[in-house]
Amino acid sequence: MPKIRLIALVVWVSLALALSVLYVIRPELLEPERVVQTLRGSGQSVVLGYVVLSIVRAFTLVPSTVLIIVGTLLFPDRPWFVMTSSLGGVVLSAVLIYYFFDFLGIGAVFERKHAKQVRWLERQMNLKGFWLVVGWSMFPFVPTDAICYVAGTLRMHVGKFAAGVALGELPIVAFYVWATGALVAG
Protein backbone atom coordinates (compact mmCIF):
# COMPACT_ATOMS: atom_id res chain seq x y z
CA MET A 1 0.00 0.00 0.00
CA PRO A 2 2.80 2.54 0.70
CA LYS A 3 3.91 2.29 -2.94
CA ILE A 4 0.41 3.21 -4.14
CA ARG A 5 0.39 6.15 -1.73
CA LEU A 6 3.73 7.35 -3.03
CA ILE A 7 2.57 7.06 -6.64
CA ALA A 8 -0.66 8.93 -5.82
CA LEU A 9 1.29 11.66 -4.05
CA VAL A 10 3.79 12.04 -6.91
CA VAL A 11 1.02 12.12 -9.53
CA TRP A 12 -1.01 14.67 -7.57
CA VAL A 13 1.98 16.94 -6.80
CA SER A 14 3.12 16.72 -10.44
CA LEU A 15 -0.36 17.54 -11.70
CA ALA A 16 -0.69 20.42 -9.24
CA LEU A 17 2.70 21.86 -10.22
CA ALA A 18 2.09 21.43 -13.94
CA LEU A 19 -1.34 23.06 -13.73
CA SER A 20 0.03 25.89 -11.56
CA VAL A 21 2.70 26.64 -14.14
CA LEU A 22 0.11 26.42 -16.93
CA TYR A 23 -2.22 28.83 -15.10
CA VAL A 24 0.66 31.28 -14.58
CA ILE A 25 1.74 31.09 -18.23
CA ARG A 26 -1.81 31.13 -19.62
CA PRO A 27 -4.12 32.73 -17.02
CA GLU A 28 -6.84 33.11 -19.64
CA LEU A 29 -7.51 29.38 -19.25
CA LEU A 30 -9.29 30.20 -15.98
CA GLU A 31 -11.42 32.97 -17.44
CA PRO A 32 -15.06 31.97 -16.94
CA GLU A 33 -16.00 32.88 -20.53
CA ARG A 34 -13.35 30.53 -21.90
CA VAL A 35 -14.43 27.66 -19.64
CA VAL A 36 -18.06 28.30 -20.71
CA GLN A 37 -17.04 28.05 -24.40
CA THR A 38 -15.18 24.80 -23.76
CA LEU A 39 -18.11 23.25 -21.91
CA ARG A 40 -20.66 24.44 -24.49
CA GLY A 41 -18.53 22.76 -27.14
CA SER A 42 -19.08 19.44 -25.42
CA GLY A 43 -22.68 19.28 -26.68
CA GLN A 44 -25.36 17.68 -24.59
CA SER A 45 -22.92 16.45 -21.97
CA VAL A 46 -22.41 20.04 -20.79
CA VAL A 47 -24.35 19.42 -17.57
CA LEU A 48 -22.34 16.29 -16.80
CA GLY A 49 -19.09 18.09 -17.64
CA TYR A 50 -19.98 20.96 -15.34
CA VAL A 51 -20.89 18.68 -12.43
CA VAL A 52 -17.74 16.53 -12.84
CA LEU A 53 -15.53 19.64 -13.01
CA SER A 54 -17.19 20.95 -9.85
CA ILE A 55 -16.35 17.74 -8.00
CA VAL A 56 -12.74 17.24 -9.15
CA ARG A 57 -11.81 20.92 -9.24
CA ALA A 58 -9.78 20.76 -6.03
CA PHE A 59 -7.31 18.34 -7.59
CA THR A 60 -6.92 20.65 -10.59
CA LEU A 61 -6.49 23.79 -8.46
CA VAL A 62 -9.39 25.53 -10.20
CA PRO A 63 -11.03 27.84 -7.66
CA SER A 64 -14.67 26.97 -6.97
CA THR A 65 -15.59 30.62 -7.59
CA VAL A 66 -14.63 30.27 -11.24
CA LEU A 67 -16.87 27.22 -11.65
CA ILE A 68 -19.80 28.87 -9.86
CA ILE A 69 -19.58 31.82 -12.26
CA VAL A 70 -19.20 29.41 -15.19
CA GLY A 71 -22.34 27.56 -14.08
CA THR A 72 -24.30 30.79 -13.83
CA LEU A 73 -23.17 31.82 -17.32
CA LEU A 74 -23.92 28.36 -18.74
CA PHE A 75 -27.33 28.03 -17.14
CA PRO A 76 -28.61 31.59 -16.56
CA ASP A 77 -32.22 30.40 -16.43
CA ARG A 78 -31.49 27.71 -13.81
CA PRO A 79 -29.97 29.44 -10.76
CA TRP A 80 -31.24 26.75 -8.35
CA PHE A 81 -29.54 24.05 -10.40
CA VAL A 82 -26.29 26.03 -10.39
CA MET A 83 -26.55 26.67 -6.68
CA THR A 84 -27.28 23.07 -5.67
CA SER A 85 -24.79 21.51 -8.09
CA SER A 86 -22.09 24.04 -7.12
CA LEU A 87 -22.65 23.53 -3.41
CA GLY A 88 -22.78 19.77 -3.90
CA GLY A 89 -19.59 19.93 -5.95
CA VAL A 90 -17.82 21.97 -3.27
CA VAL A 91 -18.85 19.54 -0.53
CA LEU A 92 -18.00 16.41 -2.53
CA SER A 93 -14.69 17.93 -3.57
CA ALA A 94 -13.94 18.73 0.08
CA VAL A 95 -14.75 15.15 1.12
CA LEU A 96 -12.50 13.80 -1.65
CA ILE A 97 -9.64 15.93 -0.34
CA TYR A 98 -10.42 14.82 3.23
CA TYR A 99 -10.12 11.14 2.25
CA PHE A 100 -7.22 11.68 -0.15
CA PHE A 101 -4.99 13.03 2.59
CA ASP A 102 -6.04 10.21 4.87
CA PHE A 103 -5.22 7.75 2.07
CA LEU A 104 -1.78 9.31 1.65
CA GLY A 105 -1.11 8.63 5.32
CA ILE A 106 -0.27 12.23 6.21
CA GLY A 107 -1.93 11.76 9.61
CA ALA A 108 0.28 8.77 10.37
CA VAL A 109 3.40 10.83 9.68
CA PHE A 110 2.28 13.57 12.08
CA GLU A 111 1.20 11.00 14.64
CA ARG A 112 4.62 9.34 14.69
CA LYS A 113 6.37 12.64 15.25
CA HIS A 114 3.84 14.48 17.44
CA ALA A 115 1.43 11.90 18.93
CA LYS A 116 0.45 13.96 21.99
CA GLN A 117 -0.30 17.11 19.98
CA VAL A 118 -2.20 15.14 17.33
CA ARG A 119 -4.45 13.56 19.99
CA TRP A 120 -5.18 17.00 21.46
CA LEU A 121 -5.94 18.45 18.00
CA GLU A 122 -8.18 15.48 17.17
CA ARG A 123 -10.21 16.10 20.34
CA GLN A 124 -10.46 19.81 19.53
CA MET A 125 -11.55 19.13 15.95
CA ASN A 126 -14.21 16.70 17.14
CA LEU A 127 -15.44 19.14 19.83
CA LYS A 128 -15.13 22.52 18.10
CA GLY A 129 -14.14 21.50 14.59
CA PHE A 130 -17.60 21.91 13.11
CA TRP A 131 -17.64 25.65 13.80
CA LEU A 132 -14.03 26.03 12.74
CA VAL A 133 -14.88 24.39 9.41
CA VAL A 134 -18.01 26.57 9.03
CA GLY A 135 -16.06 29.76 9.72
CA TRP A 136 -13.13 28.80 7.51
CA SER A 137 -15.46 27.78 4.65
CA MET A 138 -17.46 30.98 4.99
CA PHE A 139 -14.42 33.24 4.65
CA PRO A 140 -13.99 33.89 0.91
CA PHE A 141 -10.30 34.81 0.93
CA VAL A 142 -8.88 31.54 2.26
CA PRO A 143 -8.91 28.24 0.38
CA THR A 144 -11.42 25.81 1.83
CA ASP A 145 -9.13 23.01 0.66
CA ALA A 146 -6.71 23.80 3.52
CA ILE A 147 -9.27 22.95 6.20
CA CYS A 148 -10.07 19.75 4.29
CA TYR A 149 -6.46 18.63 4.65
CA VAL A 150 -6.46 19.40 8.36
CA ALA A 151 -9.82 17.72 9.04
CA GLY A 152 -8.83 14.62 7.09
CA THR A 153 -5.43 14.40 8.71
CA LEU A 154 -6.92 14.79 12.20
CA ARG A 155 -9.76 12.38 11.45
CA MET A 156 -12.57 14.79 12.22
CA HIS A 157 -15.92 13.04 11.87
CA VAL A 158 -16.61 13.19 8.12
CA GLY A 159 -20.33 13.95 8.57
CA LYS A 160 -19.60 16.94 10.81
CA PHE A 161 -16.92 18.06 8.37
CA ALA A 162 -19.18 17.84 5.30
CA ALA A 163 -22.03 19.62 7.11
CA GLY A 164 -19.64 22.37 8.23
CA VAL A 165 -18.37 22.90 4.68
CA ALA A 166 -21.93 22.99 3.32
CA LEU A 167 -23.13 25.48 5.94
CA GLY A 168 -20.07 27.70 5.53
CA GLU A 169 -20.10 27.67 1.73
CA LEU A 170 -23.87 28.16 1.34
CA PRO A 171 -23.89 31.99 1.65
CA ILE A 172 -20.85 32.37 -0.62
CA VAL A 173 -22.23 30.09 -3.33
CA ALA A 174 -25.62 31.81 -3.13
CA PHE A 175 -23.99 35.25 -3.40
CA TYR A 176 -21.92 34.29 -6.46
CA VAL A 177 -24.88 32.65 -8.22
CA TRP A 178 -27.31 35.49 -7.61
CA ALA A 179 -24.78 38.32 -8.12
CA THR A 180 -23.49 36.83 -11.39
CA GLY A 181 -27.05 36.18 -12.50
CA ALA A 182 -27.99 39.80 -11.76
CA LEU A 183 -24.96 41.07 -13.71
CA VAL A 184 -25.76 38.84 -16.69
CA ALA A 185 -29.44 39.85 -16.67
CA GLY A 186 -28.69 43.53 -16.10
Image (cartoon, grey):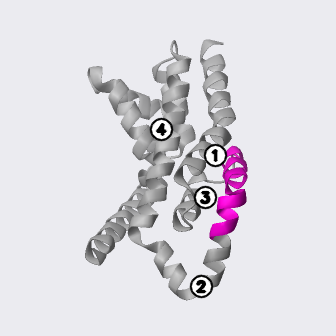
Q: Which residue is mark 2?
A: 114
Is 156 left, or right, of 100 in this rendering?
A: right
CA distance for labels 2 and 1: 26 Å
Q: Looking at the image, which residue is at 51% across and 33% down?
A: 86
Q: Position of residue 53 (x, y in %)?
A: 40, 39
Q: Which residue is mark 3?
A: 147
Q: Quadrant of the C terminus?
A: top right
- In the image, residue 70 above or below residue 152: above
Q: Which residue is mark 4?
A: 89
Residue 175, label in figure: none
CA distance for labels 3 and 4: 16 Å
Q: Position of residue 107 (x, y in %)?
A: 50, 73
Is 114 left, or right, of 77 in this rendering?
A: right
Q: Please state the extent of the stretch shown in magenta in the rendering.
A: 122-140
Q: Nearer the viewer, mark 3 or mark 1?
A: 1
Q: Disc 2 or 1, which lies upstream in sequence?
A: 2
In the image, 115 versus 172, the foreground residue is 115
- In the image, residue 56 above or below residue 106: above
Q: Are marks 2 and 3 in contact (CB under 8 Å)?
A: no
In the image, 33 versus 121, the foreground residue is 121
In the image, 165 versus 63, the foreground residue is 165
Determine whether the residue tagged by mark 1 lies in a helix, strand or loop. Answer: helix
